[in-house]
Amino acid sequence: MPARDELPGTLKRSPKKAQETWSKTHDSAVESYGEGERAHRTAFSSLKHSYEKVGDHWEPKDEKGPSDPRAARGGASARAGRGETFGGVDFYGHTKDELYQRARKLGVRGRSDMNKKELAEAIARKQD
């Protein structure tokens, strides 16, 4: 099934370029790995290099690159679930203060006592 027919809701509310990035990567991954979770993970990994989940949609990042430790590792260790991921929040692309301000806008409680990792996790939970 073509990826455009199974776009996740967050991508339906995102820029066309984000939809194309996910769809092309997904279709290519289906050819290589078959339909299923691995194709979806591959598509999201590709998307997260250029886009960040903000609320209920994806927005372009200021700088391309891995957004979390799992994406930075890649390969077999990423597929095995090693390394942290923050639900589309660009952990490496934001300072602690930027994440704090975003958490404030989302109404995250206890944010003033959180470190950068905890802020990213809290933002990811709030966005789901």
Image (spheres, helix red, strand yellow):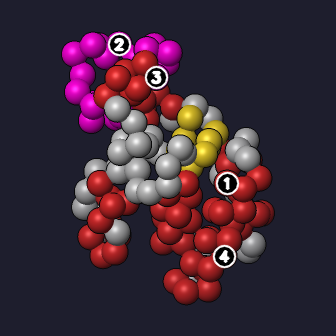
Q: Position of residue 44 (x, y in %)?
A: 53, 59
Q: Which residue is mark 1?
A: 18
Residue 73 bears which disc, if any? Answer: none
Q: Which residue is mark 4?
A: 27
User: What is the three-letter code of the residue carrying label 3?
Assistant: Arg
Magenta stretch: includes residue 111: yes
SS at circle 2: loop
Residue 102 bears which disc, if any? Answer: 3
Mark 3–mark 1 Cα distance, whole angstroms, equals 22 Å
Query: In front of the other: label 2 or label 1?
Result: 1
Q: Quadrant of the N terminus?
A: bottom right
Between 121 and 5, the one nearer to me in the picture: 121
Q: Are marks 2 and 1 in contact (CB under 8 Å)?
A: no
User: What is the three-letter code of the residue carrying label 2?
Assistant: Arg
Residue at image position (39%, 27%) is 99
Residue at image position (75%, 72%) is 2
Q: Which residue is mark 2?
A: 109
Mark 2–mark 3 Cα distance, whole angstroms, equals 12 Å
Disc on the earlier residue, 4 or 2: 4
Q: Are marks 2 and 3 in contact (CB under 8 Å)?
A: no
SS at circle 3: helix
Mark 1–mark 4 Cα distance, whole angstroms, equals 14 Å
Q: Is residue 35 above or below residue 37?
A: below
User: What is the three-letter code of the residue carrying label 1?
Assistant: Ala
Magenta residues span: 102-122
Q: Residue furthest bottom?
A: 32
Label 1: how many Cα within 10 Å (few below 14, some 14–19, many 20+)? many
Label 4: how many Cα within 10 Å (few below 14, some 14–19, many 20+)? many
User: What is the three-letter code of the residue carrying label 4?
Assistant: Asp
Q: Are marks 3 and 1 in contact (CB under 8 Å)?
A: no
